Image (cartoon, helix red, strand yellow):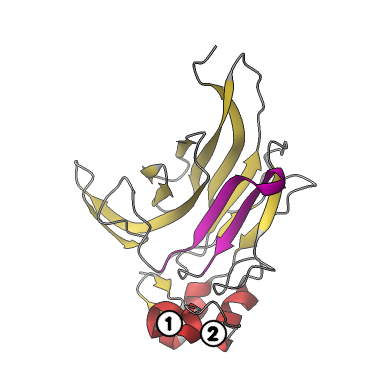
Amino acid sequence: MAIPSNILTFFIFLFPTIFFCISQATTFEITNQCSYTVWAAAVPGGGKHLEPDETWLVNIASDTNSGRIWGRTNCTFNATGKGRCETGDCNNQLECKDNGALPVTLAEFALNQYDNLDFYDLSLVDGFNIPMEFSPNSSSCRGIKCAADINAECPVELRTKGGCNHPCNVFKNDLYCCTSGNCTATYLSDFFKTKCPDAYSYAMDDQTSTFTCPTGSKAALSSTSSPMLLFSWMHRLDVFDGCI
């Protein structure tokens, strides 16, 4: 079944609060604004069945440095959380502890890195299943997106049910997988880059695909009228950790 070309969207906003003793935590607010059910997934964080307009708050521990978030489609789970998804499946579990099965569109983050920066990106290195946008409303943080209907235009050799494979997953060689760490773009990675210029199209695509925000900077929530899975990043939320 074809997946509607709605958009999985991220927004960033921060709420600094001062306590006697604080540790900086992070909360992701995930709202399904698509017209169909999405099973959101986060590592760390778990997973959640989201009907249209439903929201899931994912609290990330203060000592977490990095993680990933994605959307799963066409899932079936029983009362104990066992089941399977057509795309993005994480070891047949509703509550994800493992990465999603390929192909899957990824949002990745690395918090509190060098020079007091947080890094974020969209990646198609694991393939594509649904469009995604990460759109902070801040002069210091650039919005990024992958809004193309890649599934509908996927090259024949990369097509799979519910998504579009990255060529590494199909051909499994250094040309596409960059196992040597010394590779360049190919005509197939160029397909992804043309459709989604902000996203990683192959493993060494750092220069045009990695973005930063100052750690602890404030960004406001933006709005959009498009149907989407809305991810709001309430980033670097200060929380009381119990010390005196």
Q: Does dot 2 land on a helix, a strand or a loop? A: helix
Kindly identify which residue carries mark 1. Answer: 158
* Residue 236 visible in this rendered orientation of the protein: yes
Picture coordinates of residue 120, whole percent (x, y): 61, 53
Location of residue 171 by image quarter: bottom left
Is 155 within the magenta?
no
Q: Are marks 1 and 2 in contact (CB under 8 Å)?
A: yes
Q: Residues within 10 Å of mark 2 (few under 14, many from 20)?
A: some
Picture coordinates of residue 197, whole percent (x, y): 66, 70
Picture coordinates of residue 138, whole percent (x, y): 76, 44
Tag 2: residue type?
Answer: Leu
Q: Quadrant of the N terminus?
A: bottom left
Tag 1: residue type?
Answer: Leu
In magenta, the rendered stretch is: 103-124
Total residue callouts: 2
Kindly identify which residue carries mark 2. Answer: 188
